[in-house]
Image (cartoon, rainbow, N blue to C red):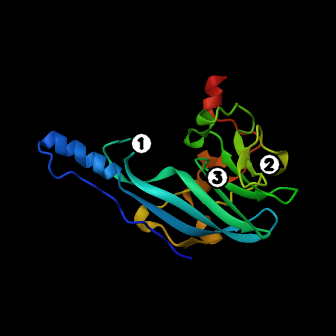
């Protein structure tokens, strides 16, 4: 179990003069800096089995959503989840904010995420269904395909993947089930739909569209 961080790459041009130009150059240079962080995560499956998954996230310098001028290393939307199950390796890379890794009745792993997070519904033209989660299943080639609606067997499954993201300097090399139980969203009454798969969940953007 280890944490891998790639070297920061920044190429500021030292020959440009002028306060405004230098300021713009600095912002541009900072935006080109990134660090990829990897950690191991203990996961309790709905079958009762426990496996370890590898999470990989790139942190880049960007402004805060509420204050674009507040530049800091923040996680990108694209993430990778890798794991092995029943002697087969799986790897998913995408923008879905995956909260559940579950094993289907036919013994295949599936990933489940709220469809509204990270604008996934918008970029994938996902319809307003209830509950508003996206389920992605792997095919024989390793490609992940999303279903038009969540399978009913997944209703009420508890979240078992880490959703909160630590600051770059605080990312640990591994997170146990106990570590993950301390995530803030798990005790937030506004995030009940993230604590388990809620069969009645509707997103605000669907309510607006309807």
Image location (x, y in percent) of residue 160: 68, 60
Q: CB of mark 2 within 8 Å of CB of mark 1?
A: no
N-terminal of the pair, mark 2 or mark 1, is 1
Rendered image quadrant of residue 127: top right
**Distance in Å between CA atoms under marks 2 and 1:** 32 Å
Label 3 neighbour load within 10 Å: few <14, some 14-19, many 20+:
many
Is residue 167 something that shows in the picture? no
**Closest to the observer, 192 or 180:** 180
Residue at the limit of the structure toward the right, as seen here: 106
N-terminal of the pair, mark 2 or mark 3, is 3
User: In the shown orientation, is residue 41 left or right of residue 102?
Assistant: left
Q: Quadrant of the N terminus?
A: bottom right
Rendered image quadrant of residue 186: bottom right
Q: Quadrant of the C terminus?
A: top right
Closer to us: mark 2 or mark 3? 3
Check disc 1 and report the residue beneath it.
65
The residue sitting at 78% across, 43% down in the picture is 150
**Closest to the observer, 156 or 71:** 71
Check disc 3 and report the residue beneath it.
98
Check disc 2 and report the residue beneath it.
155
User: In the shown orientation, is residue 26 left or right of residue 143?
Assistant: left
**Distance in Å between CA atoms under marks 2 and 3:** 15 Å
Image location (x, y in percent) of residue 6: 42, 66
**Distance in Å between CA atoms under marks 1 and 3:** 21 Å
**Closest to the observer, 68 or 18:** 18
The residue sitting at 84% across, 45% down in the picture is 152
N-terminal of the pair, mark 1 or mark 3, is 1
Closer to us: mark 1 or mark 3? 3
Q: Is residue 97 above or below residue 160?
A: above
């Amino acid at each position: 179990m280890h944490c891998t961080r790639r070297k920061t790459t920044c190429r500021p041009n030292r020959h440009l003069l002028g306060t405004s130009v230098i300021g713009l150059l600095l912002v541009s240079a900072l935006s080109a800096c990134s660090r990829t962080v990897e950690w191991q995560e203990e996961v309790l499956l709905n079958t009762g089995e426990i496996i370890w998954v590898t999470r990989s996230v790139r942190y880049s310098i960007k402004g805060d959503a509420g204050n674009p001028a507040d530049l800091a290393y923040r996680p990108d939307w694209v993430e990778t989840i890798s794991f092995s199950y029943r002697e087969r390796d799986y790897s998913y890379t995408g923008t879905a904010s995956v909260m559940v890794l579950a094993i289907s009745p036919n013994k295949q792993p599936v990933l489940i995420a709220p469809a509204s997070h990270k604008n996934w519904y918008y970029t994938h033209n996902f319809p307003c269904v209830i509950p508003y989660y996206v389920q992605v299943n792997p095919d024989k080639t390793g490609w992940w395909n999303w279903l038009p609606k969540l399978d009913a067997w997944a209703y009420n499954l508890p979240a078992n993947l880490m959703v909160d993201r630590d600051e770059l300097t605080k990312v640990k090399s591994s997170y146990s089930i106990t570590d993950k139980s301390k995530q803030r969203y798990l005790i937030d009454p506004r995030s009940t739909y993230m604590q388990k798969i809620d069969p009645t969940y509707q997103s605000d953007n669907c309510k607006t569209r309807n």
